Image: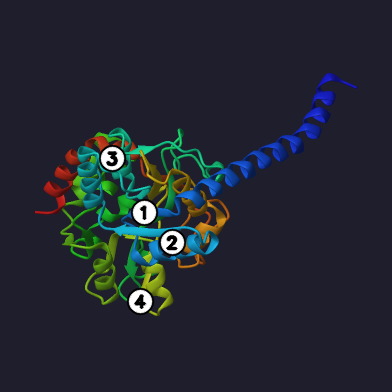
């Protein structure tokens, strides 16, 4: 037998054994976490996730592990970060797990607020949807699309890309949320600083209406107040379309995806329970809680009905958080006058 053939045969024999060993190791780790969690009996979850999803996740977790009681502190990204900062300064350690926006998670990692945990369930997640050292994994995400009113915009005149938004036909017909600085940052990263700023400066001349609240802008779009919403989260126009509103959406590739990570908190009082909760949340079982309610999962093979599986996506670059203040200033100077 040729050496290459012999190696192939050997690898085909060893591969199932390695997978079996890995599976056994993961099962053993789960058993240890469960035993530890039984002694702890509690989980404190800080999150900016919508209340419906946070509660559904905790109820399902408690149903699977009835010896655990879950307490949720639900607030904004900023208030959670501020609360954790105060707790660290006073030596108070309350939270076990935390889930906020990708930029806030980046800052928490830098400040030592979160700890690495390489969940065996994170292996299935693509690059960009998990931190390489285990500091976070994407809990759910939001695909950025452009929404439009189907009664006011003809299919044949739809823009094919962001550059088409500069056409005179769109002047005075578009709406944008006042807080799209993260989209702005990712666009400059994708397009390059100089080219990106030139595009944004031209876009700002299109007499764009500015509103406070992305969901409000989508509702006003459906009511016919605007023709096109430059930035919408996919689930909102998709849901409105299903409910009969004259709204649809298009996506420009690579489509930016805003992630919403989940992490173990550094010095978590209930560490075993925290890890067990992370495992549950990013497993198929936990992810279906989001998917069945129309939200998006980064896990391959788990997508809500109607989700565009063919798209080339670009997960938001968390490192851009370093200069978010500068991006926010420039965005507001251009669009929020």
Point 32% across, 50% down: residue:
100
Mark toward the viewer: 2 or 4: 2
- Residue 238 appears in the picture as rendered: yes
- Residue at the spot of label 1: 45
Label 2 or label 4, whichever comes before in sequence order? 2
Residue drawn at the location 17% of the way across and 51% of the way down: 204
Give the quadrant of residue 238. Answer: bottom left
Is tag 1's residue or tag 3's residue first in the polypeptide sequence?
A: 1
Q: Is residue 298 at all visible to an observer of this figure?
A: no
Outermost left residue: 337
Relative side of 320 to 160, left or right: left
Q: Secondary structure at mark 1?
A: strand
Q: Are marks 4 and 3 in contact (CB under 8 Å)?
A: no
- Mark 4 → mark 3, Cα distance in angstroms: 32 Å
Residue 151 higher or lower than 28, as above or below? below
Left or right: 332 in relation to 21: left
Mark 1 vs mark 4, foreground winner is 1
Specify the label residue 58 is tagged with. 2
For the residue pair 166 and 75, the one nearer the viewer reads as: 75
Mark 1 or mark 2: which comes first in sequence?
1
**Real-space Cα distance between discs 2 and 4?**
35 Å
The alpha-carbon separation of the residues under discs 3 and 2 comes to 38 Å
Q: Could you say whether the residue bearing mark 2 is in a helix, strand or loop? A: helix
The residue identified by callout 4 is 246
Q: Position of residue 320 (x, y in %)?
A: 29, 38
Measuring from the top left, give residue 248's x and y in whole percent.
Answer: 39, 69
- The Cα atoms of the two marked residues, 1 and 3, are separated by 34 Å
């Amino acid at each position: 037998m040729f050496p290459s053939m012999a190696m192939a045969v050997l690898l085909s024999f060893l591969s199932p054994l390695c997978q079996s060993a890995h599976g056994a190791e993961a099962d053993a780790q789960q058993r240890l976490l469960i035993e530890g969690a039984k002694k702890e009996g509690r989980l404190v979850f800080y999150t900016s996730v919508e209340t419906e999803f946070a509660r559904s996740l905790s109820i399902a977790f408690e149903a699977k592990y009835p010896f655990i009681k879950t307490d949720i502190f639900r607030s904004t990204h900023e208030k959670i970060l501020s609360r954790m900062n105060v707790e660290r300064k006073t030596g108070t350690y309350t939270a076990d797990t935390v889930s906020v926006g990708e930029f806030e998670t980046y800052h928490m990692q830098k400040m030592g607020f979160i700890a690495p945990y390489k969940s065996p369930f994170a292996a299935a997640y693509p690059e960009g949807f998990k931190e390489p050292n285990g500091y976070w994994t994407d809990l759910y995400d939001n695909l950025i699309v452009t929404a439009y009113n189907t009664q006011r915009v003809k299919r044949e005149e739809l823009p094919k890309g962001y550059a088409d938004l500069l056409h005179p036909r769109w002047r005075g017909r578009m709406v944008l949320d006042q807080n799209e600085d993260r989209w702005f940052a990712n666009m400059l990263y994708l397009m390059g600083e100089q080219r990106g700023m030139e595009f944004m400066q031209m876009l700002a001349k299109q007499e764009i209406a500015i509103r406070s609240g992305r969901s409000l802008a989508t509702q006003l779009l459906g009511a016919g107040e605007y023709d096109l919403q430059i930035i919408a989260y996919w689930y909102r126009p998709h849901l409105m379309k299903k409910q009969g509103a004259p709204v649809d959406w298009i996506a420009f590739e690579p489509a930016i995806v805003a992630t919403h990570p989940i992490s173990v908190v550094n010095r978590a009082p209930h560490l075993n329970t925290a890890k067990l909760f992370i495992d549950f949340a990013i497993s198929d079982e936990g992810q279906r809680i989001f998917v069945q309610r129309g939200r998006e999962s980064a896990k391959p093979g788990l997508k809500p009905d109607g989700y565009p599986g063919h798209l080339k996506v670009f997960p938001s670059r968390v490192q851009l958080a370093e200069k978010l203040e500068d991006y926010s200033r420039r965005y507001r100077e251009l669009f929020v006058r």
